[in-house]
Amino acid sequence: MSTAPRPTAAPRLDVDEQLRSAKILVCCGSGGVGKTTTAAALALRAAENGRRTVVLTIDPARRLAQSMGLTELDNTPRAVVGVDTSKGGSLDAMMLDMKRTFDEIVVTHAEPSKAESILANPFYQALSSSFAGTQEYMAMEKLGQLQATGDYDLVVVDTPPTRSALDFLDAPQRLTTFLDGRMIKILLAPAKASGKAYLKVVSAGFNVFTGVLTKIIGASVLQDVSQFVAALETMFGGFRERAQATYDLLKAPGTAFVVVAAPERDALREAAYFVERLAEEQMPLAGLVVNRVHRSSVELSAERSLAAAEQLDDTALASAVLRLHADRVRLAAREQRLEERFTSAHPGVPVVEVAAQPGDVHDLAGLRAVGADLAGGFAAARPA
Amino acid sequence: MSDFADVRLHVVTGKGGTGKTTVAAALALALASGGKRVLLTEVEGRQGIAQLFDCPPLPYEERKVAVAPGGGDVYALAIDPEMALLDYLHMFYKLSPTGIPARTLRRMGAIDFATTIAPGLRDVLLTGKVKEAVVRKDKSGWAYDAVVLDAPPTGRITRFLNISHEVSGLAKVGPIKNQSDSVMAVLRSPQTAVHLVTLLEEMPVQETIDGVNELTSVDLPVGGVVVNAVREPLLQPADLAAAEQGSIDSAALAAGLKEAGLDAPAALVQALAAETLEHAARVALEERGRDALAGLSRPSYELPLLAHQVDLGGLYALAASLCEQGMA
């Protein structure tokens, strides 16, 4: 590239090596950066390189889902048709059904009679379908389950489209903190000690407190909550253990995080937070994937291009072509500056770029092309 | 005359990455033009407004962040569920935020608890605060001429706004139900419009169409569609049409480059032609997106792609464009 040579070169992310050695790859990043496509492309490449692979997606775009045979949300991995299995690999794909995964945990961990009352409770229904964090937690849970089957060499997981990439790491912790919380204990108190005994147990402060609570949210709601919490308590132990086990799995050898970003300020800022957070948690970072990167291989600077266009009539083909080229070079330069800002703050993080496509990817051929870029094809195709 | 002259609550949503916060801020500036008071609010704890207006993080307090063209003020407020609850308790139950019951609630983690176990409750608190600002009056009439809400993204907007449905399973009677009903009444009224921000790319367009259908199906009033980051067409229509078909007049291009004083070796001509064909392919996709959006039959507004990251100057330019197009 003529206009903006790459100064601080980040180490290149060796995607093929990750695909050969990892057992679990977690793709994370802020919303709208192409996480799902990256996860699918990585999984396809691993499968076609000979590994038995499953990709767990959260919320794929309709056409991408269809191309992978994901037409229903049934929580079971299904074989993707059209994958080259000549090297002995295979690709299954599944979409996460958050509520069903949660229901399954309840059924596994609670006595049958309790399970029924939990599943029927309005608060459980709200929690299991919309708790900000349930999706993340259930994605982790499903990831653990898929790995435990032993059917796969590699599990690739796409993370939910959260506001911030960090929510994903915090969700299991939040759920356990919640289950251990003081509020839960207060609400459990009436269930444990009924009638007068309860009144003796609680202090005057508590009375004021529950009084306020009743006034604000209404007595019947409080009762529902209380029942739900009591029913949940029977499975707390199992729940907590599981959350911990899943968290540990993320730190285990064989797991690697792939942080995905677009070459934009906000997306790269989120990526930086995430990289820092992984380091704090001592979780293994594979590297950063920057999607939708624009480059120009034409040896002509934006300034010269515009100056040349000035010489021409505005309606001339060459004038428009030169202006378009100048726009592209400027966009490329801007993206590169943003990437460099990331790299200079996190010099050790391996990076790989994926070229911007005119349209969205929605077939296996498109995923293969992205896979080739991920493996360094895009970087190799342009002058260093 | 604005297309939304009767609207006092403008809810702005959009897929992540489409520039919804920028559009919300530009709309607030546009609505404030000519001496109006507008409140711009955010509810996701991102401090996106502060970043745009280049000011320190916003507290839970209405603060002036900008002056509009022709005199007018934009105030901003970052709504936090915990503060909104304390506010609510103060307003409806006369509980002082520093009194014992309120302090106990906080200490016990009651707010975290409530919003964790039933996210619908959090949304009632957040939209409840927005509604309070919309209907607030002072001596001279409405406290704000308009309120703009930088809302959650398109994928979650219907759930976020359709609060009475979200809490109906949890509370059939009682104070929560009453509060959510009164908020819902404002959200469904002609005073409210939900605008969707999109780019001319496949997924954002599809999400916009899905979003409009979802909002309509639950009787939430859809406003306009704002197409953000639109590039100006540089190719002449005939050249563009040819390029969309994959053809480009290389001889004319080479001649033009020479005329402009550039050496035009075949390799350069070819590389520039390739870039142009890629551009045309994207324009073709954009046109398809535009057609799909036209099918929604909603007022539509286009904002140009800014050459640099959005700064205050850029915001004013976008606001002026929205005024010109009749959105404000």
Image (tube, helix red, strand yellow):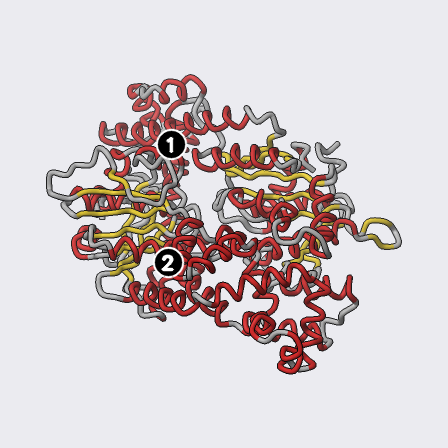
Identify the residue at horizontal 48%, vertical 72% (top origin): A180
Q: CA distance from mark 2 to mark 1?
A: 65 Å
Residue sitting nearer the eye, A240 or B96: A240
Q: On the same chain: label 2 and label 1?
A: yes
Q: Nearer the viewer, mark 2 or mark 1?
A: 2
**Does residue A107 appear in the picture of this structure?**
yes
**The disc label shown at residue A57, or none:** none
* x then y, percent, for residue B316: 63, 45
Q: Are marks 2 and 1 in contact (CB under 8 Å)?
A: no
Above or below, B279 against A247 in this view is above
**Does residue A269 appear in the picture of this structure?**
no
Where does label 2 land, which residue? A108
Q: How many marks?
A: 2
Q: Amino acid at mark 2?
A: Thr
The local secondary structure at tag 2 comes to helix
The single residue placed furthest to the left in the displayed view is A87
